[in-house]
Image (cartoon, rainbow, N blue to C red):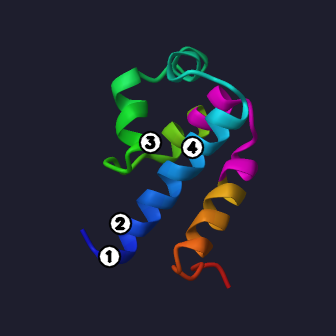
């Protein structure tokens, strides 16, 4: 995997886990609310999957946040990792 893509997946993994922990949610609770399997969420939080847009919308709902909030935290973590944002 390209270095930048690895960092992007890692930033997303950190953002999802961070939001889950902030809300004091267990993986099982997010899975139940989102309709996604625990194995999927585990691979997402470890940065080992390339989620679809639909999956990310479902994850945001499962976390009880807007997609925009998830994207904001992702962008912050990406910036911290040294990967420039691709949005001009």
Query: Dots 2 and 1: beta carbons under 8 Å?
Result: yes
In the rendering, at what x and y percent does residue 78 appear? 56, 69
Q: Which one is in front, 66 or 46?
A: 46
In the rendering, at what x and y percent does residue 24 appear? 68, 26
Instruction: Give the residue pinned by disc 4.
Output: 16
Q: In this view, does 5 lie above or below 64?
A: below
Instruction: Give the residue pinned by disc 3.
Output: 45
Instruction: Give the residue pinned by disc 2.
Output: 6
* Alpha-carbon span between mark 4 and mark 1: 20 Å
Query: Dots 4 and 3: beta carbons under 8 Å?
Result: yes
Residues drawn in magenta: 59-70
Question: Disc 1 or 3, which lies upstream in sequence?
Answer: 1
* Alpha-carbon span between mark 1 and mark 3: 18 Å
Residue shown at 68% from the left, 56% from the top: 73
Q: Classify residue 39 as left or right of residue 80.
A: left
For the residue carrying disc 2, how many other residues have a C-alpha within 10 Å: few (<14), some (14-19), or many (20+)? Answer: few
For the residue carrying disc 1, how many other residues have a C-alpha within 10 Å: few (<14), some (14-19), or many (20+)? Answer: few
In the rendering, at what x and y percent does residue 50 appear? 36, 51
Question: Disc 4 or 2, which lies upstream in sequence?
Answer: 2
For the residue carrying disc 3, how many other residues have a C-alpha within 10 Å: few (<14), some (14-19), or many (20+)? Answer: many
Quarter the N terminus occupies:
bottom left
Q: What element carries label 2?
A: helix
Quarter the C terminus occupies:
bottom right
Instruction: Give the residue pinned by disc 1.
Output: 3
Which quadrant of the figure has residue 63? top right
* Alpha-carbon span between mark 4 and mark 2: 15 Å
Residue 17 disc label: none
Question: Disc 4 or 1, which lies upstream in sequence?
Answer: 1
* Alpha-carbon span between mark 3 and mark 2: 13 Å
Q: What element carries label 1?
A: helix
For the residue carrying disc 4, how many other residues have a C-alpha within 10 Å: few (<14), some (14-19), or many (20+)? Answer: many
Answer whether residue 31 is magenta in the image. no
């Amino acid at each position: 995997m390209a270095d930048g893509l690895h960092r992007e997946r890692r930033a997303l993994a950190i953002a999802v886990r961070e939001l889950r922990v902030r809300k004091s949610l267990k993986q099982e609770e997010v899975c139940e609310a989102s309709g996604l399997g625990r194995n999927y969420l585990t691979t997402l939080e470890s940065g080992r999957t390339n989620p679809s847009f639909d999956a990310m919308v479902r994850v945001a709902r499962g976390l009880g946040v807007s997609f925009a909030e998830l994207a904001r935290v992702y962008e912050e973590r990406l910036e911290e990792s040294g990967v420039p944002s691709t949005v001009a």
